[in-house]
């Protein structure tokens, strides 16, 4: 155990985490030169294109220091706010953390929130100033920020560059010297923390774990503490560039277990593995069921693809247990699924993967959050969809989820960002000047307000400088109304929204105007109405395309023209009664882009 070092890398998105991990793998000769490619731990095309880590990875490296062989276990973490629970479990499996800060951008929101998590678990923090080779690097300014944040001395900060490999040897030496070896009792009953799982189409679910106490051998009969399921350890081993089977793993080791598990929901990140014969008394603290935060309907463009879409989502769920879905139907869109996501990035990635990996054409409805409704009879109902709302007369009150939001920005954008947050029903809790040119704002605001376009608008008003992080806090009573959109008197349930009463009139008017632009003209008038209950609050009309039936009349008596026009009028009346309105997909997405 004295020669094992378990560490993770924490950083904001795009601060060079994956590139620095590449250099560490090369320096320890974990990967052969011919197998090397950039962002080697990011194995999805989507991760490489966007430059973000979506799925965390773990890898073992061997490093020789002063004639002694050390085992270094790197547990990579995703950088985005949507995956913060996965980050917390990865941090819980480590004794040390590399805190990477971009020398050109300085400290940002995600850096701080992940750092607080690492400090909570008493990790040894090694500060690293990355991208030192860039012309725009500001080492002195950013070092001051790190010193203010950590309370370390300037000499503790390692200057590095993931691109050139500068500082990599110093990082490896610092990991060996400063990160403490894992603590634990090798004689105690087995207690291992699951920090990640992946699906393999030949072997089933592979769970990654770190042994806190005890040991595990191939063939052991084990159980997962929180789910209560029992399995045989068919294969255990460590993660190098490929999986490397071992007969036995001991306290402090990071490894994997394959036991023929077919369903991702049976392996929960944060669960504890123990022996069936000699179980541990309690599970490792910190386990939570990951709850979806944002819900949206996903429907196939072609109704005959419904079963294919179900199979595609089920396959995605094998790799991503945090994705939930239930079948639902819509009068406007037919049969589809109500899916739950961790956040908007998660939703965007799932849509992209459906398109790329399964070639599925889908329509996604307006995302919304889950509300808690208390009925007049005192029942508590969780509502994920406006159409699932009980009648107004049966509702006692509606509670909506609130979040604690943290924005870090430059002082010149302070006024515009405060206005944005206050417009979104936020309450400013405090503001702290981290340095002369960086200020941190803390808000409480409804989750529903950031679902639409909050992040995009924040980035545009701060010229891309502001960084944003949030975590859920609680549910609070809200004055919400259900806004329905009607086309020729018929409700389009896919465009319904639960919305704050104060914003309903403005939102209804804007959506009617947007739909008027997008819905193609028919041979009859189309009435677009926004309604709260029976009350119409906004209306627009798409005028009919009029065929010129009098074109063939050259001169002659006016009564001939009038006769043709009367005939056309009767035909239009009949058409109006049986006319169906075609709504293009762009109309469903328009709601998201009302401010463009």
Image (cartoon, rainbow, N blue to C red):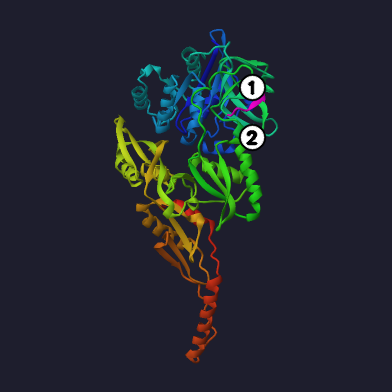
Stretch of the chain drawn in magenta: 227-232
Which mark sits nearer the N-terminus, 2 or 1?
Answer: 1
How far across and how far down the image is residue 194, in percent?
56, 25
- In the image, is 558 to the left or to the right of 478? right
Q: Is residue 519 above or below residue 125?
A: below
Mark 2: secondary structure: loop
How far across and how far down the image is residue 4, in percent?
55, 14
Q: Is residue 225 above or below residue 441?
A: above
Q: Is residue 487 above or below residue 558?
A: above
Q: Residue at x 52, y 38 (%)?
A: 50
Mark 1: secondary structure: strand
Q: Residue at x 46, y 31 (%)?
A: 15
How far across and how far down the image is residue 237, in percent?
64, 20
**Residue under circle 1?**
222
How far across and how far down the image is residue 232, in percent?
68, 23
Between 398 and 161, the residue placed more toward the observer is 398
**What label sits on residue 190 in the rendered view?**
none
Q: Is residue 581 above or below residue 44?
A: below
Q: Are marks 2 and 1 in contact (CB under 8 Å)?
A: no
Q: Nearer the viewer, mark 2 or mark 1?
A: 1
**Residue under circle 2?**
263
């Amino acid at each position: 155990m004295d020669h094992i070092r378990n560490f993770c890398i924490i950083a904001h998105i795009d601060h060079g985490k994956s590139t620095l991990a590449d250099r560490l793998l090369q320096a320890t000769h974990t990967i052969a030169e011919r197998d090397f490619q950039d962002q080697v731990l990011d194995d999805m095309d989507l991760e490489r294109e966007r430059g973000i880590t979506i799925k965390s990875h773990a890898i073992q490296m061997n490093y020789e220091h002063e004639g002694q062989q050390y085992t270094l276990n790197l547990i990579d973490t995703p950088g985005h706010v949507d995956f913060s629970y996965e980050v917390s479990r990865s941090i819980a499996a480590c004794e040390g953390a590399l805190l990477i800060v971009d020398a050109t951008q300085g400290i940002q929101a995600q850096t701080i929130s992940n750092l607080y998590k690492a400090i909570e678990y008493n990790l040894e923090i090694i500060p690293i100033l990355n991208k030192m080779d860039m012309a725009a690097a500001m080492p002195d300014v950013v070092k001051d920020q790190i010193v203010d944040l950590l309370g370390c001395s300037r000499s503790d900060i390692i200057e590095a560059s993931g691109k050139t490999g500068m500082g990599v040897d110093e990082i490896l030496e610092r990991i060996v010297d400063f990160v403490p070896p894992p603590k634990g009792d090798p004689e105690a009953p087995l207690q291992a923390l699951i920090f990640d799982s992946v699906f393999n189409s030949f072997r089933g679910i592979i769970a990654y774990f770190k042994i806190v106490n005890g040991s595990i051998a191939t063939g052991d009969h084990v159980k997962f503490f929180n789910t209560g399921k029992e399995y045989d350890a068919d294969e255990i081993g460590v993660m190098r560039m490929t999986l490397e089977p071992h007969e036995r793993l001991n306290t402090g080791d990071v490894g994997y277990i394959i036991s023929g598990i077919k369903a991702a929901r049976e392996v929960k990140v944060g669960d504890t593995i123990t022996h069936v014969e000699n179980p541990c008394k309690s599970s490792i603290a910190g386990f939570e069921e990951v709850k979806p935060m944002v819900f949206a309907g996903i429907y196939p463009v072609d109704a005959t693809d419904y079963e294919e879409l179900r199979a595609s989502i089920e396959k995605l769920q094998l790799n991503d247990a945090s994705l939930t879905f239930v079948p639902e139907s819509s009068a406007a869109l037919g049969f589809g699924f109500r899916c739950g996501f961790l956040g908007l990035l998660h939703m965007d990635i799932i849509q992209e993967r459906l398109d790329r990996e399964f070639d599925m054409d889908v329509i996604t409805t307006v995302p919304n959050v889950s509300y808690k409704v208390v009925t007049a009879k005192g029942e508590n109902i969780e509502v994920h969809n406006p159409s699932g709302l009980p009648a107004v007369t049966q509702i006692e009150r509606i509670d909506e989820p609130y979040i604690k939001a943290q924005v870090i920005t430059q002082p010149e954008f302070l006024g515009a960002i405060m206005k944005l947050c206050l417009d979104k029903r936020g309450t400013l809790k405090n503001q702290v000047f981290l340095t002369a040119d960086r200020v941190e704002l803390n808000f409480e605001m409804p989750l529903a307000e950031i679902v639409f376009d909050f992040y995009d608008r924040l980035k545009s008003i701060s010229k891309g400088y502001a960084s944003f992080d949030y975590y859920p806090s609680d549910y609070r009573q809200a004055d919400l109304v259900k806004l329905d959109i009607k086309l020729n008197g018929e409700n389009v349930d896919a465009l319904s929204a639960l919305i704050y009463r104060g914003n309903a009139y403005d939102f209804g008017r804007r959506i009617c105007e947007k739909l008027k632009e997008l819905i193609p003209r028919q041979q009859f008038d189309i009435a677009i109405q926004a309604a709260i209950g029976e009350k119409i609050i906004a209306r627009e009309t798409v005028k009919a395309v009029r065929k010129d039936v009098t074109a063939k009349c050259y001169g002659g008596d006016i009564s001939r023209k009038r006769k043709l026009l009367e005939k056309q009028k009767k035909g239009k009346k009949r058409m109006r009664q049986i006319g169906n309105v075609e709504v293009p997909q762009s109309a469903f997405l328009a709601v998201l882009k009302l401010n463009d």
